[in-house]
Amino acid sequence: MSTAAPAPTAPSCPDCGDASSRWFRPGPPEDRPQVGSPEDAAEVVRPCLRGLDREHCLIVPLDTKHRLIGLRTVSVGTADHTFMAPREVYRDALLVGASAIFVAHNHPSGDATPSADDRQITRRLAQAGATVGVELLDHLVVGDPGWVSLARLGVL
């Protein structure tokens, strides 16, 4: 007789904020957390984006059941800008067979208010995702201590 496994916790990866852009892979599908809301995504990315002195862009690729496939640092920028080219974001998502993604980046200033550029790139990423068949579920801007969902602001 089998017993139910405990609910998986969000991954914590001390290296995911590193400029080397490593993958973090959380294990077999049955052990991966489901990321179905901005809160779930924030729980995954905040440990990686906290306390950084430059903006980092991360993607959270998800399978068809919105379970976490991995976590990838797409780019590392400056104190007030990072690079989020659709081809870079979706290349990584397509390579792991993602059906959907969350994108997140930090604001080192601590103010999570999205900029006009943040809104514009979110729209571009959503269009690119529709073209390649990988849905952009949300773009999170992470500050300290809060974060903002651009989908909840109506950008998506």
Image (cartoon, rainbow, N blue to C red):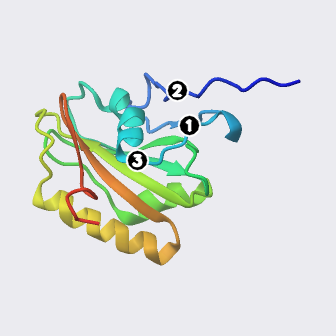
Q: Would you identify the image quadrant in which residue 86 lies?
A: bottom left
- Say which label, 2 or 3, has the lower sequence index: 2
Residue 90 picture location, percent across and down: 47, 61
The residue shown at (20%, 66%) is: 120
**Mark 1 residue type:** Pro
- Disc 2 crowd rating (10 Å Cα; few below 14, some 14-19, many 20+) is few
C-alpha span from label 1 to label 2: 7 Å
Cβ–Cβ below 8 Å for labels 1 and 2? Answer: yes
Q: Which sits in the foreground, 86 or 116? A: 116
Query: In the shown orientation, is residue 9 left or right of residue 85?
Result: right
User: Which residue in the structure is indicated by mark 3?
Assistant: 37
The residue shown at (54%, 42%) is: 34
Query: In the shown orientation, is residue 1 left or right of residue 136?
Result: right
User: Which residue in the structure is indicated by mark 2?
Assistant: 9
The residue shown at (49%, 40%) is: 71
**Mark 3 residue type:** Ser
**Mark 2 residue type:** Thr
The answer to whether residue 116 is visible is yes
User: Which residue in the structure is indicated by mark 1?
Assistant: 33
C-alpha span from label 1 to label 3: 12 Å
C-alpha span from label 2 to label 3: 15 Å
Cβ–Cβ below 8 Å for labels 1 and 3? Answer: no
Residue 29 picture location, percent across and down: 68, 41
Q: Which sits in the foreground, 73 or 142? A: 142
- Disc 1 crowd rating (10 Å Cα; few below 14, some 14-19, many 20+) is many
> Which numbered disc covers residue 134?
none
Q: Would you identify the image quadrant in which residue 47 lies?
A: top left
Q: Label 2: state its secondary structure.
A: loop
